[in-house]
Image (spheres, rainbow, N blue to C red):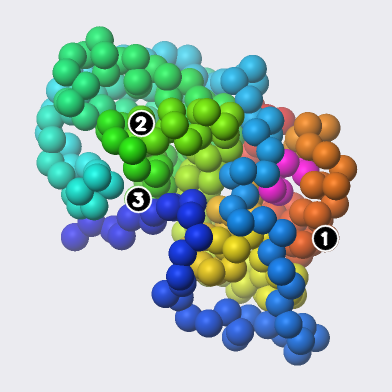
Amino acid sequence: MKNIFLFSFLILCISTCNSIEKNIPEECTTLGTPPFGGTIFIDPDIITPEDPTTFISLIYNGQGSRTMFDRRVNDWVTLNPYLFTSQYDDGLYIEIQVNPEFESPEVAEVQALKFAEVIGRLTTQLRKDVETVWIHRGNEPFGGGNNNLLIHTDWSEENYESQGILEETLVHEASHTSLDSYHAETENWLNAQSIDCNFISDYARDNPIREDVSESYLPYLAIRYRADRISPSLKQTIENTMPNRINYFDNQNFNMYPIE
């Protein structure tokens, strides 16, 4: 049976998780109010199209049977997608699977090339567990997890690209893929979450296990590696809201290439 796919709807929702009250230490009488609704929107310049990409080549491998998740039907589908191997200069490879609804290898390649280059702007740490990318048409949000990134191109154009937050969104989704399983339920992370007495966003607060790492990681990247691109007030808000999570991330020795 396939692993449960970790979806990131990037909208506020009613949590089905256990109450976060168990994570409030005695010194926290109440939780603070999260400063953001969701963190992909905090600044569009944390990573930009002008930043370097690790992407170096794309190879077309024909078509083949693959099982992919399609949010339009909210289920797994077995298709015969166009298959591409994207290569990155840090030695990582990703198979990009493009839905055959794109009608030809040439049209599919345009989409594969576009997203392969953008994904290459993510750090080695965020790409290390990304084995596949699924690309569909459709006005549905992205997803991450299951060694994959899920992309719906219509939603991307209308919601992420139009706001300049495509890279920031992929940081969030790749955090699901390459960070969650190592950190989201560890004792040290839960302790940091607890001692901070707050969450960086409503989305993280409402989904403390599923979304807190991904919601926190982009703000961390912003203050540690892109502080010159964000406002002093934004930097201070992030630092004041999640100091112990910041310290936790500092201690992980993440591979930040090509950002650092």
Alpha carbon distance from label 1 to label 3: 33 Å
Q: Residue at x 48, y 45 (%)?
A: 173
| Residue situated furthest top in the rendering | 106
Categorize mark 1 by other alpha carbons within 10 Å: few (<14), some (14-19), many (20+). few
Q: Which residue lies under the disc numbered 1?
A: 240
Decide if residue 67 is on the left or right side of residue 35: left
Alpha carbon distance from label 3 to label 2: 22 Å
Q: Residue at x 48, y 36 (%)?
A: 159
User: Residue 44: x percent and y percent?
Assistant: 65, 33
| Residue 103 numbered mark, or none | none
User: Residue 36: x percent and y percent?
Assistant: 67, 56
Q: Within the image, what quadrant is residue 43 found in?
A: top right
Q: Earlier in the sequence, mark 2 or mark 1?
A: 2
Given the image, on which type of amino acid does mark 3 rest? Asn
Given the image, on which type of amino acid does mark 2 rest? Asp
Which image quarter is the C terminus in? top right
Q: Is residue 199 above or below residue 250?
A: below
Q: Is residue 161 magenta?
A: no
Q: Earlier in the sequence, mark 1 or mark 3?
A: 3
User: Residue 70: x percent and y percent?
Assistant: 24, 44
Alpha carbon distance from label 2 to label 1: 36 Å
Q: Which residue lies under the disc numbered 2?
A: 154
Q: Which residue lies under the disc numbered 3?
A: 146
